[in-house]
Image: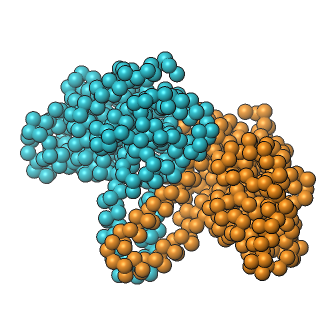
Chain colours: A cyan, B orange
């Protein structure tokens, strides 16, 4: 299969992106091809600086770059020859089976939504991240594609995330929780209450009830559903809180004894490894008619490598047709709520 | 002043509640009085088991108790003689200057809202918690009193939290951030965009812009404003994530060496002390016509003690009249949005 990579996207582009692509190439099949999209000269320089063979690597020149802080839709309109715009166009024209980007998330989501259209039956796509927890990986959707959700959107996120969790993580019957402010059925805002009714009505979903903030990390669910506003806050909060706590620990240790700090280092490394969400590479934009993986702007080569591998698994496991199938058999038609 | 305490509220009631009250008594003025509300016999037994002197302690008998998981409004209607109902009634009748409860939060908020009415000019009360961060304490409001906010509600939370932050934490000109999904002005849902305009229009507020999830803990603000739904998720997530990380560290340490784990123990204790939100005791219900402090259901004596002391400071620093004053001088009248 062909996987297109936005070589210009992210804080460490193009070097780390290309490095990640090369690392992934070694693990892909011999008939897979990686397409690097971006400034041809920059990419070529980068490839030759590491003496990379040109095997199964193709470059598609994109003379424009969308910056990380540009306004998404506006920048897409202005920069039709940016790596993100070209990447989405290639997916639409079936010139690639998957796309991966660590660039401007808003622009990437907008480009894919505008160009690739939605999967049959899907009303609004959502971004799903995998959060490592002591109880195992939890898939949370949406984390920012759709900040004003309707109940049917959340229901579809539950469907898509369940399929994703099953196919990507091997969780047989993923337990779906709905983010709310209390576990009891009476708790929650209007959106939560209406969504709950939809989730309950579908016997093919393993809906386990409302989820409090603490429920994401305590092993009560495999899939956590919420509007993009809440999911985005949760995701960024989690990242920063983990970082803050570890630096507080480090500061305290160094103040006490350098020796103790040194002894603690491998412990930190081990925990980072266990709960490192970079391991999962990137987050799919579920619900578009294609395979789209979005990576964090700070991604280094390992994340890019893992995202490329994940996009391959996503495509090979036919997640999109399984989603379409699920929705087709659902008693809840889009106009049902 | 008189401070009424719900002796039956919380997972460790009445023992830890009464213990906290006794600890607080030692630190209060000689003309302060603590009123313990609850089952007279239970309270008396508890007091005599620790040989407590009856000085400045009064018991008000409440023959009913609202359980932690009862439906708030329904339980209040049924149990008019519960400690929470009596506590709120006493505040209304000016039989106490402050109330403190670690009981059913929903019932406590509902009882106080229904009985005590709002401060002049305030449309909806909000619960404000103080989160300790590396950049100093951050006041977050609302964390669950109001899950369907209007822009004017969020504006008023900014006003009330600013006054609270100034008077309780000594922060001269608290920087107010508005929870959103991106720092740029264009980011956010409709509520965020409309609220931003209100916050910007008031020169008496030190509004510093949108706040991402990571912004709560990175020192960019002193006050974080959000709807109760988001705030509640953030609060509970923070609690559980911190707990999860520390137990992951502990597990990893013990697996390596008991000796290393022992050496690390004082480091944990120190960090817990530095970032322990129990230090701040409880969360005020800002905007009601009185002083109400709500404590976590898991509160032990130290939290109750600190909440009692905080309620005294709240009352003595005339926070409510300062809020009323601020709103009176505001160009934004309740009907302005």
From the image, which quarter does the C terminus of chain B lie in?
Answer: top right
Residue depicted at x 66% and y 38%: B149
Q: Is residue B260 above or below residue A296?
A: below
Can residue A224 be seen here? The reply is: yes
Q: Nearer the viewer, residue A40 or A151?
A: A151
**Picture coordinates of residue A74, whole percent (x, y):** 43, 29
- Tell me the quarter of the picture where residue B303 sits: bottom right
Q: Is residue B69 left or right of residue B247?
A: right
Up the image or down, B232 lies above or below B276; here it is above
Asked whether B132 or B31 is in front, the reply is B31
**Quarter where residue A2 is shown:** top left
| Picture residue at 74% right of the left edge, 77% below the top | B49
Quadrant in which the N terminus of chain B appears: bottom right
Residue at the spot 39% in from the left edge and 56% down from the top edge? A134
Residue B171 location, x and y as percent? 68, 62
Closer to the camera, A331 or B277?
Answer: A331
**Identity of the residue furthest to the top in this view:** A335
Residue B181 place in picture, x, y as percent: 51, 42
Residue occupying image coordinates x 25% and y 47% = A306
Residue A306 drawn above or below residue B130:
above
* Residue B202 appears in the rendering: no
């Amino acid at each position: 299969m062909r996987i297109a990579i936005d070589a210009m996207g992210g804080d460490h582009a193009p070097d780390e992106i290309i490095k990640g692509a090369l690392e992934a190439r070694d693990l892909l099949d011999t008939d897979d091809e990686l397409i690097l999209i971006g400034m041809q000269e920059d990419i070529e320089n980068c490839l030759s600086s590491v003496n990379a063979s040109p095997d199964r690597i193709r470059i598609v020149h994109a003379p424009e770059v969308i910056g990380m802080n540009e306004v998404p839709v506006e920048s897409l309109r202005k920069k039709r020859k940016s790596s993100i715009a070209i990447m989405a166009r290639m997916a639409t024209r079936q010139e690639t089976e998957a796309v991966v980007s660590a660039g401007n998330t808003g622009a990437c989501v907008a480009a894919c939504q505008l160009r690739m259209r939605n999967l049959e039956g899907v009303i609004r796509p959502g971004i799903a991240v995998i959060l490592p927890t002591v109880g195992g990986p939890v898939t949370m959707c949406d984390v920012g594609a759709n900040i004003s959700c309707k109940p049917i959107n959340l229901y579809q996120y539950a469907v898509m995330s369940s399929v994703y969790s099953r196919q990507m993580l091997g969780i047989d019957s993923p337990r779906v929780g709905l983010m709310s402010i209390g576990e009891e059925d009476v708790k929650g805002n209007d959106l939560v209450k209406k969504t709950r009714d939809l989730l309950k009505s579908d016997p093919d979903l393993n809906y386990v009830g409302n989820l409090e903030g603490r429920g994401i990390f305590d092993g009560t669910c495999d899939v956590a559903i919420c509007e993009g506003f809440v999911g985005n806050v949760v995701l960024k909060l989690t990242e920063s809180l983990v970082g803050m706590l570890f630096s507080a620990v480090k500061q305290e240790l160094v103040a006490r004894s350098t020796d103790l700090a040194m002894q603690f280092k491998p412990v930190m490394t081990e925990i980072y490894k266990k709960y490192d969400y970079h391991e999962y590479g990137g987050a799919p934009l579920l619900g578009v008619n294609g395979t789209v993986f979005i990576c964090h702007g700070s991604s280094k080569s390992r994340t890019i490598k893992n995202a490329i591998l994940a996009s391959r698994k996503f495509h090979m496991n036919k997640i999109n047709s399984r989603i379409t199938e699920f929705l087709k058999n659902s008693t809840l038609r889009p106009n049902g709520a």
